């Protein structure tokens, strides 16, 4: 077997075998296949495509190129959710304690903020004492005892994808459905959970900007997950404006606590309940969506989800006092208001630009090594469709640095558009793939 023949075969639109895909992934990961041959193959795949079987095979080989987490030491049904990335997306922190209160086990690896999107790990690091790195034994024990642990990705998860994604990024071969689906699913499948629900975002703050593309990606990932032997579902949810009212790290934790106390924003809770319904029904804990929703609502009204959240934070070394007194999780002392210029409605909030404004305030990072100002971010008072009066405060920027606050203000002001007529609101959920 050699790379020349594999490229030639794909160039003519033929299907690659399981072994040929394995040969490429192994050789590219260990450096024996050079970038120029891998680039040629990616471009051939881009133009000629891969069928379903090839996509599953590529996913499995990329999953097996590194560590595959063994969760067999955890009793019960292990579940996970994964978002394709967004702004103000704190669903994992609200949903996980709700699912754990229903008896499921959430053993989760999460990411950090990069570019305009936030990361669950940064949000958790805003909590005093919280440890995002645990030994495998500690991780298993915490999940067994409390039902949840969330850690930063450790070890080598799908190194083949890491290398290939970086190559695709500079060779204009990212936007191929099979390549995207196998890239995302190889990492998710390496996480070891039994049941996975994917939250595919759509709109101006999302990786996929149109509903059609997002639905196609959702379907491709569900198919690949099922082909790899896992129960996978997906929802397509709106990311055409930030989710909820808070964007940042401490800002978002405030919203998480309020949501677990029963005061969650409608859009955030709808995404949480929809993801949770897929997971609770797929795991057989609930017979149908209505039952699942009731169970989840009960975890909030009884205070069980909040209690579970505190148990999880304490188990990972975090100080939970902020749950009763949010001032212990301070927001930046320098604030700037975004003011409505006239009477009317908010017609559009460019979600990516709001993510960039949050980054500019200090809440995010442009490169992996950038430090984060946990107290920085944005809290909205109004969202798309809200009526406004001239002078109303639409949103407040928080930062600990005057220049950063001003940069964030300029960006956020540009991201918000107004109209005289009430705009049509987007749906919160565009579809479910099961
Ligand atoms: N995110 C990934 O992890 N991989 C892709 O190919 C695209 C988005």
Image (cartoon, rainbow, N blue to C red):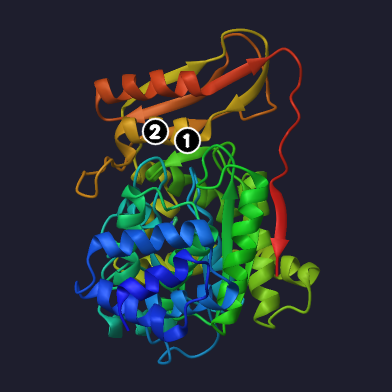
Can you give x and y, in whole percent of width and height, for residue 249 in the image?
38, 45
Nearer the observer, 197 or 386: 197
> Quadrant location of residue 313?
bottom left
Q: Which residue is drawn at 35% across and 45% down?
A: 329
With 380 as the anchor, is 27 left or right in this view?
Answer: left
Of the 4 image quadrants, the one containing the C terminus is bottom right
Residue 352: assigned label = 1
Mark 2 vs mark 1, CA separation in Å = 6 Å
Res 318 seen here: no
Vertical arrangement, residue 176 with respect to residue 73, above or below: above
- Quadrant in which ligand 1 is drawn: bottom left
Q: Which of 57 and 47 is in front in this view?
A: 47
The picture places residue 357, in percent across and down from the top left corner, at 39, 30
Dot 2 beta carbon under 8 Å from ligand 1: no
Image coordinates for residue 21, horizontal then vertical, percent: 40, 78
The crowding category of the residue bearing disc 2, from other C-alpha atoms within 10 Å (few below 14, some 14 to 19, many at least 20), is many
Residue at left offset 65%, top offset 12%? 389
Quick one: label 1, few (<14), some, or many (20+) residues within 10 Å? many
Residue 356 bears which disc, if any? 2
Residue 250 image offset from top left, x and y in percent: 38, 44
Looking at the rendered structure, the secondary structure element under dot 1 is: helix
* Residue 282 appears in the figure: yes
Find out whether the residues at labels 2 and 1 contact each other: C-beta distance under 8 Å.
Answer: yes
Residue 249 tag number: none
Report helix, strand or loop for mark 2.
helix
| Residue at x 69% of width, y 68% of height | 277
Left or right position of 357 against 349: left
Q: Which of 288 and 399 is in front in this view?
A: 288
């Amino acid at each position: 077997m050699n790379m020349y023949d594999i490229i030639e075969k794909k160039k003519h639109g033929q299907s690659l075998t399981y072994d040929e895909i394995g040969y490429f992934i192994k050789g590219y990961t260990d450096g024996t296949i050079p970038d120029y041959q891998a680039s040629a193959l990616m471009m051939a795949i881009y133009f000629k495509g891969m069928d379903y079987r090839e996509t599953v095979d590529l996913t499995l080989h990329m999953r097996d190129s590194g560590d595959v987490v063994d969760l067999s030491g955890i009793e019960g049904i292990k579940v996970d959710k994964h978002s394709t990335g967004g702004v103000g997306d704190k669903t994992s922190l609200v949903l996980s304690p709700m699912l754990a209160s229903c008896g499921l086990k959430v053993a989760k690896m999460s990411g950090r903020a990069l570019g305009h999107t936030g990361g669950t790990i940064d949000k958790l690091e805003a909590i005093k004492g919280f440890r995002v790195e645990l030994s495998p034994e500690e991780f298993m024990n915490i999940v067994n005892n409390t039902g949840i642990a969330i850690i930063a990705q450790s070890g080598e998860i799908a190194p083949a994808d890491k290398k290939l994604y970086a190559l695709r990024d500079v060779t204009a071969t990212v936007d191929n459905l099979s390549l995207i689906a196998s890239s995302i699913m190889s990492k998710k499948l390496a996480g070891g959970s039994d049941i996975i629900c994917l939250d595919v975002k759509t709109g101006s703050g999302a990786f996929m900007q149109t509903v059609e593309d997002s639905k196609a990606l959702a379907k491709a990932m569900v198919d690949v997950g099922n082909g790899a032997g896992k129960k996978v579902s997906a929802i397509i949810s709106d990311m055409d404006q930030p989710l909820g009212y808070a964007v940042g790290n401490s800002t978002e934790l405030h919203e998480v606590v309020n949501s677990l106390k029963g005061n969650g924003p409608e859009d955030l809770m709808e995404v949480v309940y929809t993801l949770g319904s897929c997971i609770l029904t797929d795991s057989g804990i609930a017979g149908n969506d209505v039952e699942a929703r009731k169970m989840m609502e009960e975890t909030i009204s009884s205070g069980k989800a909040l209690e579970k959240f505190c148990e999880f934070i304490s188990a990972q070394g975090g100080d939970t006092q902020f749950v009763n007194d949010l001032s212990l999780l301070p927001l930046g002392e320098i604030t700037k208001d975004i003011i409505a210029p006239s009477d009317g409605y908010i017609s559009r909030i460019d979600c990516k630009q709001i993510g960039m404004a949050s980054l500019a305030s200090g809440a995010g990072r442009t490169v992996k090594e950038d430090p984060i100002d946990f107290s920085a971010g944005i809290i909205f008072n109004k969202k798309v469709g809200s009526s406004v009066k001239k002078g109303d405060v639409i949103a407040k920027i928080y930062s600990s640095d005057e220049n950063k606050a001003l940069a964030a203000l300029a960006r956020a002001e540009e991201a918000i558009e107004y109209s005289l007529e009430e705009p049509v609101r987007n749906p919160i959920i565009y579809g479910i793939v099961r």
